[in-house]
């Protein structure tokens, strides 16, 4: 690793809170809070254990799997269309019991039917690309929530200003609405918070097949626009889903009207991402791309989500992108 990159990580480690590591929580496949079964009276069990998941892509599917495996929740998966319903049921319902606990409908059906105040828990993890008015979609989704449980919205770190050169940002960092894209994300967050929900501001998401590394090494033109030591904050899709579970677990008493910053806690660089991916069987033998970034280009920001980890009693299973790729050798 380059000396500048090593110094970057050392600086971040010294500046971040010492309370960044926690006792290992009990878990099955996923790293969730130690208490994974619902604790409620029989009178409220039927209603308080239901969750509407809006957006059944990679994140929503992982969330559904984790909830079915580790909790007693009944789920309503809400999608843009019915085209993938059959495939989703096959992928998610690997145990016969799960078929009784998962139903699917479209967003249009959910909003046109008499579904207001139907769900104690709502998780909105659909991307903005599926909506003409993203903030309004959040406001509409809030109508499905009956306020008995949590309303969770997965936002992104794209709402932060592009002015940082190695500085640390956290949940309280001032945002910047100077571009339409950032303004859309910030306004969506505001809609969630105004409706009593919580925002999970996610780092860049990835799996083996998805993420910047895949584009740079497989689908791109061999050129990365940005300096090789530009800072990137990452989070595996499964860890993003487990953070949603953690938010549901702590409940609105703790998460309502709060913003949480979710990442694996180990910022990396563009070049390091490629170096890590090239260790895996899938990308072995691929060529390192050429990085074209100006010397005066800002390197970017370092996420400090230690407060969020403590508050949600959550920590990423894949502690870094490099750690994940080493399991793919």
Image: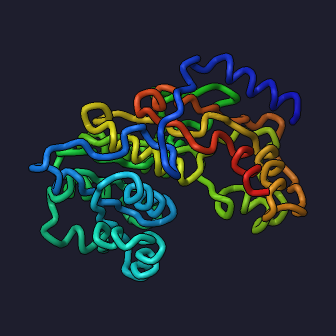
Q: Residue at x 84, y 28 (%)?
A: 4
Report the side of 202 relative to 118 (left or right).
right
Q: Residue at x 16, y 72 (%)?
A: 113
- In this view, the residue in front, 211 or 89, is 89
- As drawn, 17 above or below 69: above
Report the side of 9 relative to 223 (left or right).
left
Q: Residue at x 29, y 74 (%)?
A: 105
- In this view, the residue in front, 36 or 287, is 36
Q: Residue 315, percent across and down?
A: 53, 36
Q: Quadrant of the C terminus?
A: bottom right
For the image shown, how many numbered marks are present on the structure?
0
Q: Residue 10, percent across and down?
A: 75, 22
Q: Is residue 182 visible?
A: no
- As drawn, 115 above or below 258: below
Q: Is residue 48 visible?
A: yes
Residue 72 appears in which quarter of the rendering? Answer: bottom left
Q: Residue 112, percent across and down?
A: 19, 72
Q: Residue at x 12, y 68 (%)?
A: 114
- As drawn, 241 above or below 23: below
Check the image and tell me how it is coloured.
Answer: rainbow
Report the side of 190 relative to 283 (left or right).
left
Residue 1 appears in which quarter of the rendering? Answer: top right
Q: Residue 205, percent across and down?
A: 58, 52
- In this view, the residue in front, 314 or 274, is 314
Residue 130 appears in which quarter of the rendering? Answer: bottom left
Report the side of 39 relative to 281 (left or right).
left
């Amino acid at each position: 690793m380059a000396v500048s990159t090593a110094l970057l990580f050392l600086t971040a480690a010294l500046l971040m809170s010492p309370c960044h590591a926690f006792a290992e929580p009990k878990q099955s496949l996923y790293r969730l809070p130690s208490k994974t079964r619902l604790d409620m009276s029989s009178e409220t069990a039927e209603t308080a254990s239901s969750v509407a998941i809006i957006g059944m892509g990679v994140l929503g599917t992982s969330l559904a799997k984790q909830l079915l495996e580790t909790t007693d929740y009944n789920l309503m998966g809400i999608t843009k269309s019915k085209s993938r319903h059959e495939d989703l049921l096959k992928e998610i319902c690997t145990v016969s019991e799960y078929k009784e606990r998962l139903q699917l409908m479209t967003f249009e059906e959910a909003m046109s039917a008499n579904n207001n105040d139907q769900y104690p828990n709502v998780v909105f993890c659909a991307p903005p690309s599926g909506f003409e008015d993203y903030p309004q979609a959040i406001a509409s989704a809030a109508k499905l929530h009956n306020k008995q449980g949590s309303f969770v919205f997965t936002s992104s770190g794209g709402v932060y200003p592009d002015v940082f050169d190695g500085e640390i940002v956290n949940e309280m960092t001032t945002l910047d609405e100077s571009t339409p894209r950032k303004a859309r994300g910030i306004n969506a967050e505001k809609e969630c918070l105004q409706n009593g929900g919580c925002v999970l501001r996610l780092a860049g998401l990835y799996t083996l097949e998805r993420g910047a590394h895949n584009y740079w090494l497989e689908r791109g033109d061999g050129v990365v626009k940005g300096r090789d030591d530009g800072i990137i904050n990452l989070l595996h899709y499964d860890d993003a889903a487990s953070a949603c579970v953690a938010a549901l677990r702590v409940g609105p008493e703790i998460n309502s009207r709060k913003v949480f910053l979710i990442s694996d806690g180990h910022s990396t660089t563009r070049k390091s991402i490629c170096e890590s991916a090239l260790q895996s069987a899938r990308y072995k033998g691929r060529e390192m791309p050429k990085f074209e970034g100006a010397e005066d280009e800002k390197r970017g920001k370092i996420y400090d989500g230690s407060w969020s980890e403590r508050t949600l009693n959550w920590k990423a299973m894949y502690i870094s992108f490099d750690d994940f790729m080493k399991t793919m050798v």
